[in-house]
């Protein structure tokens, strides 16, 4: 007895389904074009440009005039960029240092005693031994650091420190002459710079500011920079001992008002503003009473 018709139909469906799938896959792979057996949908390529028709040979065009060429623009100079650089960590060499190394004491002495055309002799105000005979607002120069003296003359000359008399004198001096004078006065002995007046010993307030300062006012002790009893500390931190009291007051007031501005990063201007006029006067008398000698 043969298979029923239903069985034949079922078998036909089983065989037909994969056959239809195979035919559809074959059509997708080979019926839509492409370069291989597995090809994506065709990518339309833009039409090729028409071929360029070569013209008949013609005379070579004349060279463009030089004026038609674009101008060459030189590069702009680089501008400094704020921040640190390698030079920030190099040793600073002040401008007067090289001149001081070549300075001649005898030349400085001659210039100090006789002056030159347009430049008054230094001894007229600062005395033959660097100790002023005038007192008042004229400093004693004997034994001050040569570096400090050179810097002050340099500052008078370039205008960073101003004075009615000294600015004009410094402008008449060369680098070498400034160095000669600084070396000469820096080498003079300080043994003659004793107290200008008898010491009464009444310097308690000044001594406190000099040795302790005042923390609440952010005021450091003067001795931190100017040494014990004002005898100086370092080449650019001047000796205060033995200076006339009027000179000290005059300079502190110049710092307070901003008339003198050649202090390092404005330190003295800031400290002078934190001192009272009475404290400045007491410090002036205290330093005047201190001996500038090395005993």
Image (spheres, rainbow, N blue to C red):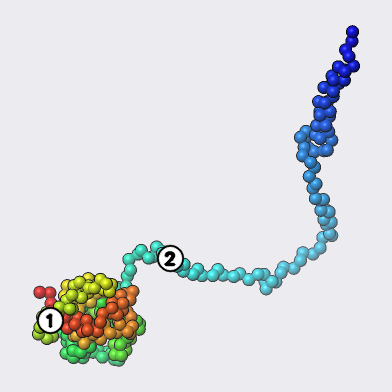
Q: Which of marks 2 and 1 is nearer the N terminus?
A: 2
Image quarter where the N terminus lies is top right
Q: Is residue 129 above or below residue 43?
A: below
Q: Which mark is residue 4?
A: none
Image check: 197 left or right of 180?
Answer: left
| Secondary structure found at label 2 | loop
Specify whether residue 269 is in view.
yes
Relative to 170, is 36 above or below?
Answer: above
| Labelled pair 2, 1 in contact (Cβ < 8 Å) | no
93 is higher (above) or lower (below) than 17: below
Residue at the top extreme, as displayed: 1
Percent x, y of residue 216: 27, 72
Query: Which of the 4 image quarters holds residue 256?
Result: bottom left
Q: Name the residue under label 2.
A: 83
Question: Which residue: 27% across, 74% down?
Answer: 217
Q: For residue 8, what is the image quadrant?
A: top right
In the rendering, at what x and y percent does residue 204 appear?
A: 15, 78
Numbered circles on residues, count: 2
Q: Can residue 179 be seen in this view?
A: no
Q: Would residue 35 be found to the left or right of residue 214 on screen?
A: right
Tell which of 283 and 90 is nearer to you.
283
Who is closer to the viewer here, 5 or 84?
Answer: 5
Q: Name the residue under label 1.
A: 202
Q: Where is residue 104 in the image (x, y as percent from the top left)?
A: 23, 78
Side (left or right) of 195 relative to 95: left
């Amino acid at each position: 007895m043969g298979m029923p018709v239903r069985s034949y139909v079922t078998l036909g469906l089983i065989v037909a389904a994969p056959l239809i799938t195979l035919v559809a896959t074959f059509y997708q792979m080979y019926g839509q074009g492409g370069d291989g057996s597995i090809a994506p949908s065709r990518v339309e390529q833009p039409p090729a440009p028409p071929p360029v028709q070569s013209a008949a040979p013609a005379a070579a065009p004349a060279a463009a005039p030089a004026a038609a060429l674009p101008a060459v623009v030189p590069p702009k100079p680089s501008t400094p960029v704020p921040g640190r650089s390698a030079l920030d960590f190099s040793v600073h060499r002040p401008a007067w240092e090289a001149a001081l190394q070549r300075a001649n004491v005898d030349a400085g002495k001659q210039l100090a005693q006789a002056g030159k055309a347009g430049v008054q002799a230094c001894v007229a105000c600062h005395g033959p031994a660097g100790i002023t005979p005038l007192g008042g607002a004229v400093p004693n120069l004997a034994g001050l650091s040569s570096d400090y003296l050179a810097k002050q003359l340099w500052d008078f000359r370039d205008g960073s420190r101003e004075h009615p008399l000294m600015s004009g004198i410094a402008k008449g001096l060369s680098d070498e002459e400034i160095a000669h004078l600084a070396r000469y006065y820096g080498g003079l002995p300080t043994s003659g710079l004793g107290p200008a007046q008898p010491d009464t010993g009444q310097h308690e307030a000044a001594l406190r500011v000099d040795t302790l300062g005042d923390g609440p006012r952010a005021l450091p002790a003067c001795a931190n920079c100017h040494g014990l009893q004002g005898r100086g500390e370092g080449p650019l931190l001047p000796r205060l001992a033995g200076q006339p009291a009027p000179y000290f007051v005059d300079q502190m007031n110049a710092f307070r008002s901003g008339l003198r501005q050649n202090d390092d990063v404005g330190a003295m201007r800031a400290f002078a503003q934190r001192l009272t006029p009475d404290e400045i006067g007491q410090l002036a008398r205290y330093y005047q009473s201190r001996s500038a000698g090395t005993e």
